Amino acid sequence: MIKNNADLLKILSLPNILIINMLSNNEFIARIINLTQGNRKIPSKTKKAFYSGFRLEGNKLFFYRDGPNTDWAFDIRDLWEVYSTQEFINTSVVKKVLGGRTNSPMLAILIEINCIDEYGRRI
């Protein structure tokens, strides 16, 4: 029985209790589409590079990385798979989920569309 806030905090800190904050797939896609509107420029997680020129063609998200200057693309279904199956997301998690590919831009995009915080926790 919960008698006060301290009791509630004890229950919430138990390892078998999960509080899941997660967008629906439609909400997630809407946020990706919003990323392509206007001339958005978002920082990398490390703030050493920027991503811009976002465009969505089918399930492929295309963009440009400034520093080093490279074109990037990935399937947003891969991004959804990482987001929807993981409570904590960093480059190691992305690599594990997607079969060996590390994809740092995914982290920056998930942060930008308010799916994870800067520490990789789902929000």
Image (tube, rainbow, N blue to C red):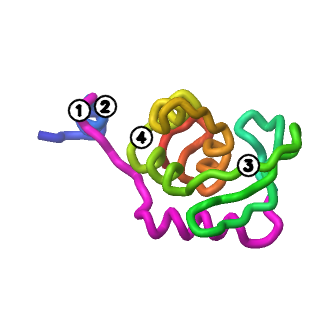
Which of the labelled discs sits on residue 72, or is there none? 3
Given the image, on which type of amino acid does mark 4 rest? Gln
* Sequence order check, earlier mark of 3 and 2: 2
Could you tell me which residue is drawn at 57 percent across and 54 percent down? Answer: 75
Question: Is 85 displayed left or right of 92 in the figure?
Answer: left
* Sequence order check, earlier mark of 1 and 4: 1
Look at the picture and state if 55 lies above or below 123.
Answer: below
The answer to whether residue 36 is magenta is yes
Q: Position of residue 23 (x, y in %)?
A: 44, 60
| Alpha carbons under labels 1 and 3: distance apart | 39 Å
Could you tell me which residue is drawn at 53 percent across and 32 percent down? Answer: 95
Disc 2: which residue: 13
- Magenta segment range? 15-40
Which of the labelled discs sits on residue 16, or is there none? 1
| Alpha carbons under labels 3 and 2: distance apart | 40 Å
| Alpha carbons under labels 4 and 3: distance apart | 23 Å
How busy is the neighbourhood of tag 4: few (under 14 within 10 Å), some, or many (20 plus)?
Answer: some
